[in-house]
């Protein structure tokens, strides 16, 4: 059996060669162990009952993934639900096929931690990283956003950090999804992370979704009304930048690493307040997703997408997707083996199109940077052609006018 590092080298080689049928497995796996959650956070589809398939992943699906788990360099064991509530999560976590060098990542609200689950987390042999979603530094804000008690999750984080002792495993982060309600708690959030002894802080902006989607998120909770459209920090750009700079500087002072999702995505660059002092305070970690173009590449092309060579996402109902950006399923583990799906016609078609620098038909409605950039380029080209057609029509009208004027002059003679 190949090691994850050997498999990753084969993945890279297959991508560079534009291979369509692969001898390697994906180096990155996202396994949606559950789509059930015990909380109803206001910015999450669970809050508006928009999760259409709330269920735990069946054990039979997990069993079919042992071979591919053994090859993974990185595996996410969460989706839109709370992983600690899922039997499938614990089954995957204890799967002996997972290599000790595999980076295992989970996002959790950590409210369901108990002594038995704590012991299981501490016993994981792979490189486990636990990112705890908290979103607030005060009881009031936590109750508004997450509908639960901050003290409970803080106690669980403290218990987890204490239990690992000097081993520094698992790695523990806390994260905040930013909005108007909590942005002014960014500095206290960093200070809380320092007091808890965690290994770093993640900040994320809320997704700026289409208006018709954001309008669905209007929620009354006690004396507070949440409106997704109004809470988005795209409405408060200067405030957001200022608070984040202060948080980054506070992290530098405390030695607390901060992992924003990327400065370009975290800060608003069309308003002032991004200062030079903020940048050295940031320690960025590669995202747990398929690699994109090289840093600084302004216009990612379809050929830069590596997802069909190195990434696979498995949902709770066994569907296999090539990414999480809107591509349709390429198969279902209830009907086929993973290996059959991985090298099936749909996946080979995706790889062929991308290696030829074409957006696959299956991806045309996707929302990734490759599709959006290609769509923008196409629209710009259509605009240029339209303008050129207008100019040509104007030129022809001018020539026709000159010809008619000439004919009229001849008639007068």
Image (cartoon, rainbow, N blue to C red):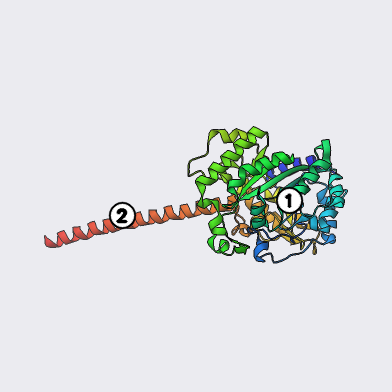
Taking depth in this image into account, of 203 and 354 the one nearest to the observer is 203
**Residue 308 seen anywhere in this rendered image of the structure:** yes
Secondary element at tag 2: helix
Residue at 68 percent of width and 36 percent of height? 256
Which label number is shown at residue 263? none
Residue at 14 percent of width and 62 percent of height? 411
Residue at 39 percent of width and 54 percent of height? 387
The percent coordinates of residue 19 (x first, y second) are: 70, 47
The percent coordinates of residue 12 (x first, y second) are: 71, 42
Q: How many marks?
A: 2
User: Which part of the image, by quadrant, shows the N terminus?
Assistant: top right
- Residue that extends furthest to the left in the rendered view of this protein: 413
Q: Residues within 10 Å of mark 2 (few under 14, many from 20)?
A: few
Q: Nearer the viewer, mark 2 or mark 1?
A: 1
Left or right of 381 in this view: 5 = right
Q: Which residue is mark 2?
A: 395
Left or right of 261 in this view: 389 = left
The percent coordinates of residue 389 (x first, y second) are: 38, 56
Residue at 48 percent of width and 55 percent of height? 379
Q: Residues within 10 Å of mark 1 (few under 14, many from 20)?
A: few
**Residue 103 seen anywhere in this rendered image of the structure:** no
Taking depth in this image into account, of 334 and 81 the one nearest to the observer is 81
Above or below, 147 against 156 in this view is: below
> Marks 1 and 2: in contact by CB < 8 Å?
no
Secondary element at tag 1: helix
Instruction: Decide which of tag 2 and tag 1 comes sooner along the chain.
Output: 1
Disc 2/disc 1 C-alpha distance (Å): 73 Å
The percent coordinates of residue 223 (x first, y second) are: 60, 61
User: Which part of the image, by quadrant, shows the C terminus?
Assistant: bottom left
Q: Which residue is mark 1?
A: 151
């Amino acid at each position: 059996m190949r090691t994850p590092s050997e498999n990753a080298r084969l993945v890279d080689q297959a991508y560079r060669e534009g291979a369509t049928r692969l001898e390697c497995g994906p180096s990155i796996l996202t396994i949606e162990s559950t789509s059930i959650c015990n909380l109803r956070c206001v910015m999450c589809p669970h809050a508006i009952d928009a999760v259409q398939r709330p269920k735990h992943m069946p054990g039979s699906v997990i069993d079919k993934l042992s071979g591919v788990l053994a090859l993974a360099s990185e595996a996410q064991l969460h989706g839109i639900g709370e992983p600690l509530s899922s039997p499938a999560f614990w089954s995957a976590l204890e799967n002996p096929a997972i290599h000790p060098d595999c980076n295992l990542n989970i996002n959790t609200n950590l409210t369901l931690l108990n002594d038995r689950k704590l012991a299981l987390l501490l016993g994981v042999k792979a490189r486990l990283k636990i990112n705890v979603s908290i979103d607030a530094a005060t009881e009031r804000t936590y109750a508004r956003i997450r509908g639960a008690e901050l003290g409970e999750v803080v106690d669980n984080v403290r218990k987890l950090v204490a239990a690992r002792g000097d081993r520094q495993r698992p790695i523990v982060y806390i994260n905040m999804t930013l909005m108007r309600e909590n942005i002014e708690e960014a500095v206290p959030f960093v200070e809380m992370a320092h007091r808890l002894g965690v290994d770093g802080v993640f900040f994320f902006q809320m997704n700026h979704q289409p208006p018709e989607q954001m309008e669905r998120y209007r929620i009354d909770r006690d004396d507070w009304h949440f409106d997704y459209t109004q809470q988005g920090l795209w409405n408060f750009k200067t405030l957001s930048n200022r608070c984040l700079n202060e948080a980054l500087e506070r992290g530098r002072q405390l030695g607390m690493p901060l992992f924003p999702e990327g400065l370009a995505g975290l800060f608003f660059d069309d308003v002032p307040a991004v200062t030079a002092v903020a940048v050295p305070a940031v320690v960025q970690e590669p995202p747990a997703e398929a690699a994109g173009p090289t840093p600084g590449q302004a216009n990612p092309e379809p050929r830069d997408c590596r997802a069909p060579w190195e990434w696979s996402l498995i949902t709770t109902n066994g569907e296999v997707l090539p990414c999480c950006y809107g591509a349709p399923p390429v198969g279902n583990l209830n009907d086929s083996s993973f290996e059959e799906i991985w090298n099936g016609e749909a996946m080979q078609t995706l790889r062929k199109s991308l290696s030829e620098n074409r957006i696959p038909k299956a991806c045309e409605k996707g929302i990734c940077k490759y599709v959006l950039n290609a769509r923008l380029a196409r629209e710009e080209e259509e605009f240029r052609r339209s303008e050129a057609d207008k100019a040509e029509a104007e030129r022809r009208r001018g020539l026709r006018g000159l010809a008619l004027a000439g004919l009229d002059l001849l008639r007068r003679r």
